[in-house]
């Protein structure tokens, strides 16, 4: 299988403080990879470097063979990044927002088809024609997931996608993620919900204080720590680190 | 602490940020500086002007009263007037310049050569006329200098000096020519108004118009431009900065920056959209203003036609003014894109517009009060360096055919706009848009923070 994402000794400093201390990992095509770690561990920083938003202080990241630092344009064509707590343009309706984004990827009929797909994914009913500033958190998140998946990226990067959502919304979003992975899209996501990561992710990386301290499938990790849940693994790993 | 003081102190902490305090202090300094500038402009204008008296000999008249015979002349009256108001006798020649010539054309040439702004030309038959009981003619000649609001006060000082001369002569005539009964002549022995006022505009001599009237007409036609430009720049600027602030607040910027679009397209798209809005605002204001102006001039026009003075703009000139305006909007937007890159959210974006507003106000005041042509080298340098000055000055400059100033302003703005856009694109390629200023290494070095 192709390597969708390769991080090689990636470091990031904010000013003089290093927030990520040399992370190396590889994600295969079609995999769902979960990043876990407590608040401030460096998950968002890592995801932003993968998404071409932050300059990498040292080390390299490649996405489907394209170097993030030297070929950001190529990388942006095949990724989709969903920031944590993201919003949309308040004055637009959901449909107009999807049309706006689709305009960067396609034109004419193709664009219309992309918007159709986005509306199906968002599944907001007639509220798709309401202004987004009237949306609830769950509705907004569905719209943004739809926006991220609609252009059929090869790598989807999602920062805490289900945080703050109700059971049904979270469940449906997990279903969508599973479905796109089955169709060959690689997913890298962060989450604080160990149950979700356990169920959804093919492999998991645990970040603590900017270091990658654990890497493996949820099954492997549970076995290694003799734990029943990923939560237990996480607590033990972080305490030992 | 009661609940209300708790809330008040929290709100104050939020509102009194270093940024807002600094901008208020800047405003105070700016206005104080302007006050000083206006003061000195008025003083300069109201002091006794440098005056050239041409054909002084023609004004010498002999009077005989109880004490005997003495002579009177315009220059001797002026010398008395100037010395009695505190000008030392050895400096008099700096103020009153006597030229012996009975040709008015020579007078123009001398004024032009020596940069003298006002002159009195005494008619060769002046004393003969006075003695024979007809009104003597003295022509007031001015060179029209394009300055700001107060620059032309000196011409009114000269005409009041002229009326003092008239009054003095009238007194002497009333005291000596007891047999004369033509009181019209006795009270107004000098004919110095009406067509005897001559103003040299752009090298052309026009009669019956004072520089003040011209300045009034020019400024009524061009005065609104600096104000309109200032309003547009502030408005468009705050549009762009707030849009950046809210893009950051909603993290739409983060999304935008990971889409397959060039940074230059994002920057250019934002700038062009705001520039279009700015131009629409600008045109709307201009149309509104010109309707307002037209309805005013209908009732209180000075009857002065600037076209006759050669002070008009061709279609090409208007195109230059529009180009200058458009470029200044682009420059403003470039500055705003840079400022906006540092705005953390919608609220901090609001204070970010302050530097821009100040930059727009400085040239507006300078252009309105002292004018480009009336300012010293330092103020001219400051004015030129602020891109928004150029459209504010363009219309007046073109009226005086100063195309060089307008074109060099346009060239400067092009360079300025390109520079700001390059800086913006650079910022868009850096972390600053995502992380803000706090973590920037150079900023940390500058503020000594670790
Ligand atoms: N803009 C920034 N400037 C300075 N330090 C930052 C900045 N962004 C993040 N950091 C620091 O980098 C470290 C990692 O932050 P990051 O946001 O990546 O954590 P995270 O794992 O996403 O946390 P959370 O689960 O709370 O979202 C933290 O110590 C944080 O304080
Ligand atoms: Mg985070």
Image: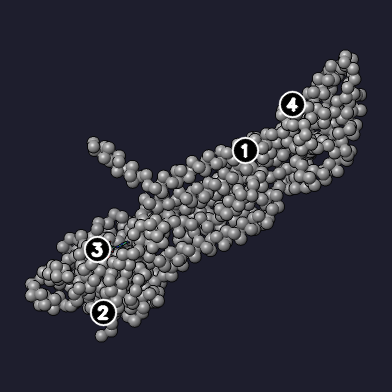
> Which residue corresponds to mark 1?
B40
The secondary structure type at the circle numbered 2 is: strand
The secondary structure type at the circle numbered 3 is: loop
Q: Quadrant of the C terminus of chain A?
A: bottom left
Q: Based on the displayed image, in which of its 4 quarters is residue A132 positioned?
A: bottom left
- Please, which chain is the residue tagged with disc 4 on? B
> Which residue corresponds to mark 3?
A40
Label 4 beta carbon less than 8 Å to ligand 1? no
Camera-side residue of B310 and B58: B58
Proximity of marks 4 and 3: CB atoms separated by less than 8 Å: no
Question: Residue A151 appears at what percent x and percent y?
Answer: 33, 72
Q: Are marks 3 and 2 on the same chain?
A: yes
> Closer to us: mark 4 or mark 3?
4
- Please, which chain is the residue tagged with disc 3 on? A
> Which residue corresponds to mark 2?
A26
Label 3 beta carbon less than 8 Å to ligand 1? yes
Camera-side residue of B395 and A173: B395
Identify the residue at image location x=59%, y=45%.
Answer: B366
- Above or below B81: residue A66: below
Q: Is residue B267 left or right of residue B71?
A: left
């Amino acid at each position: 299988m192709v390597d969708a994402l390769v991080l090689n000794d990636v470091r990031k400093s904010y000013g003089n403080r290093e927030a990520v201390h040399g992370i190396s990992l590889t994600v295969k095509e079609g995999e769902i990879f979960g990043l876990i770690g407590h608040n401030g561990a460096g998950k968002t920083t890592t995801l932003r470097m993968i998404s071409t938003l932050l300059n990498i202080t040292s080390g390299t990241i490649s996405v489907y063979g394209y170097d993030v630092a030297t070929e950001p344009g190529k990388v942006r064509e095949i990724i989709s990044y969903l920031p944590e707590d993201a919003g949309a343009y308040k004055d637009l309706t959901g449909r107009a927002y999807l049309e706006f984004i689709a305009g960067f990827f396609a034109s004419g009929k193709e664009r219309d088809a992309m918007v159709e797909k986005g509306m199906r994914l968002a599944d907001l009913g007639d509220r798709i024609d309401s202004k987004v500033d009237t949306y609830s958190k769950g509705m907004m998140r569905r719209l943004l997931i739809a926006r991220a998946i609609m252009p059929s990226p090869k790598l989807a990067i999602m920062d805490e996608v289900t945080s703050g959502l109700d059971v049904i919304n979270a469940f449906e979003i997990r279903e969508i993620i599973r479905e796109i992975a089955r169709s060959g899209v690689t997913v890298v996501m962060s989450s604080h919900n160990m149950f979700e990561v356990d169920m959804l992710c093919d492999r998991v990386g645990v970040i603590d204080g900017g270091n990658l301290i654990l890497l493996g499938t949820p099954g492997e990790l549970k076995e290694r720590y003799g734990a029943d849940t990923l939560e237990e693994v996480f607590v033990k790993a972080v305490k030992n680190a | 602490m009661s609940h209300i003081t708790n809330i008040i102190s929290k709100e104050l902490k939020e509102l009194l940020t270093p940024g807002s305090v600094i901008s208020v202090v800047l405003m105070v300094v700016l206005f104080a500086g302007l006050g000083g500038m206006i003061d000195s402009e008025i003083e300069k204008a109201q002091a006794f002007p440098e005056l050239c008296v041409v054909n002084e000999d023609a004004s010498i008249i002999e009077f005989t009263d109880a004490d005997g015979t003495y002579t009177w002349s315009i220059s001797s009256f002026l010398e008395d007037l100037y010395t009695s108001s505190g000008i030392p006798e050895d400096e008099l020649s700096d103020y009153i310049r006597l030229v012996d010539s009975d040709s008015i054309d020579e007078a123009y040439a001398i004024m032009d050569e020596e940069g003298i702004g006002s002159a009195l030309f005494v008619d060769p038959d002046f004393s003969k006329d006075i003695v024979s009981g007809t009104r003597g003619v003295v022509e007031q000649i001015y060179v029209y200098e394009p300055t700001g609001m107060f620059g032309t006060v000196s011409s009114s000082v000269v005409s009041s000096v002229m009326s003092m001369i008239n009054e003095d002569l009238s007194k002497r005539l009333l005291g000596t020519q007891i047999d004369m009964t033509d009181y019209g002549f006795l009270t107004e022995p000098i004919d110095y108004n009406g067509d005897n006022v001559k103003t040299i505009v752009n090298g052309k001599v026009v009669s019956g118009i004072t520089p003040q009237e011209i300045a009034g007409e020019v400024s009524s036609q061009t005065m609104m431009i600096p104000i309109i430009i200032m309003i547009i720049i502030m408005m468009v600027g705050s549009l762009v900065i707030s849009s950046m602030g809210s893009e950051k607040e909603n993290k739409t910027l983060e999304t935008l920056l990971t889409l397959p679009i060039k940074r230059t397209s994002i920057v250019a798209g934002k700038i062009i959209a705001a520039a279009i809005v700015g131009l629409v605002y600008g045109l709307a204001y201009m149309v509104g203003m010109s309707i307002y102006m037209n309805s005013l001039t209908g009732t209180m026009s000075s009857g002065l036609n600037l076209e006759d003075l050669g002070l008009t703009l061709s279609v090409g000139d208007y195109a230059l003014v529009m180009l200058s305006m458009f470029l200044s909007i682009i420059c403003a937007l470039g500055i705003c894109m840079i400022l906006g890159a540092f705005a953390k959210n919608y609220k901090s974006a609001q204070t970010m517009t302050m530097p821009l507003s100040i930059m727009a106000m400085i040239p507006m005041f300078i252009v309105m009060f002292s004018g480009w042509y009336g300012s010293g080298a330092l103020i001219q340098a400051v004015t030129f360096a602020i891109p928004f000055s150029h459209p504010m000055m363009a219309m007046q400059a073109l009226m005086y055919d100063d195309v060089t100033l307008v074109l060099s302003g346009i060239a400067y703005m092009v360079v300025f706009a390109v520079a700001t856009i390059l800086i913006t694109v650079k910022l868009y390629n850096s972390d600053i848009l995502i992380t803000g200023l706090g973590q920037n290494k150079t900023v940390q070095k500058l503020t000594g923070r670790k």
